[in-house]
Image (cartoon, rainbow, N blue to C red):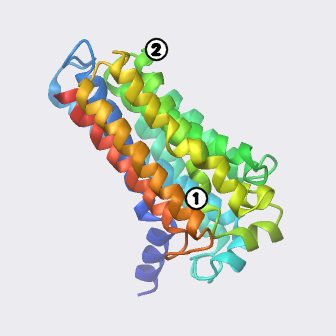
Amino acid sequence: MASRRGLAAGWELVRPFTLVAPALGMFSGAVTAYGARPRYAHAHDSLSAWGIDVALGAVAAGVLNGASNVLNQVYDLQIDRINKPSRVIPSGRLSIRTALALAAVLYAASLAAAATINVGVFVMFALAALATVVYSAPPFRTKRFGWWANVTIAIPRGLLLKVAGWSVTKSILAPEAWLIGAVFGLFLLGATTSKDFADVEGDRAHGCRTLPILYGRERATRFIHPFFTVPFLLLAAGAAGGIFTGNRIVLVALGLGCAAWGHAVVRMLQRDPGAQVTENHPSWRHMYYLMFTLQVGFVIAYLT
């Protein structure tokens, strides 16, 4: 019974809902590259071998995100005692030592899986893993430093994730891969602040100067507004101009639709920046839903 409770606590600690976006992002990046010019080409001996690497990469991306979630909660213990006391570590269901061991196992498993795919994927995973440690752990702990916190989230979970997915299939040096990654990275550069609106009390008490603390909730909302719209408008403009090799109509519609959705999410924040659903502001879930939509939209655009 005790081991079953420990497994349940460990599963909760990795925050399963947040694992879907990176896994889907890795899958989407690989399939997007498959449909990009040259069409339906991949650097594998067979289609089945490519499919195995795509699946392995998706699992590895989810595992890496789980590792970073666990590590972050270890170093956020004092903050979570104020903001989220029911979480696994502050509630005493798992010790810090056990959580650190779990994080180490997950990091190692993710990097080992990435290494079996190819060098490009491994390099992207290694850089992303490093960024997650820099975000959460001393001596850097960029979570304390406003925009730097956002940068160290946006790079691994936006830019590098898409390039890693692409490099399962085609060259990591392809400019199109980095342009697609830039759309996701630029979005997350502002959108990741949506998780901070519900955490002001604990973050302020323990020296994490998030944007809502630096600027106040109202001004922070104004600052992040462009990141919820401009990247998607750039996607639409780039698609219309032929920069991307996917279906032009689908990509333009995807960009415009996500820009409208992003604007609506910011209006939600403006109406009630202190609202909370479960642990976070409702806009945090919409950030993930937008990511899911983008990932699926790219797959459709590059396979049609």
**Residue pictured at 47% horizontal, 71% vertical:** 12
Instruction: Name the residue that disc number 2 marks.
Output: 173
Q: Quadrant of residue 254?
A: top left
Residue 168 located left or right of residue 161: left
Q: Taking 182 as reference, is 282 above or below it?
A: below
- The amino acid on which the numbered mark 1 sits, given as a three-letter code, is Ser
**Sequence-wise first label, 1 or 2:** 2
- The amino acid on which the numbered mark 2 sits, given as a three-letter code, is Leu
User: 230 or 137, which is in the foreground?
Assistant: 230
Q: Quadrant of residue 304?
A: top left
In the displayed orientation, state which residue is furthest to the bottom.
Answer: 1
User: What kind of element bears circle 2?
Assistant: loop
Q: Taking 46 as reference, is 252 above or below it?
A: below
Report x, y in % for residue 255.
37, 36
Camera-side mark, 1 or 2? 1
User: 78 or 202, which is in the foreground?
Assistant: 202
User: What kind of element bears circle 1?
Assistant: helix
Instruction: Name the residue that disc number 1 marks.
Output: 194
User: 150 or 247, which is in the foreground?
Assistant: 247
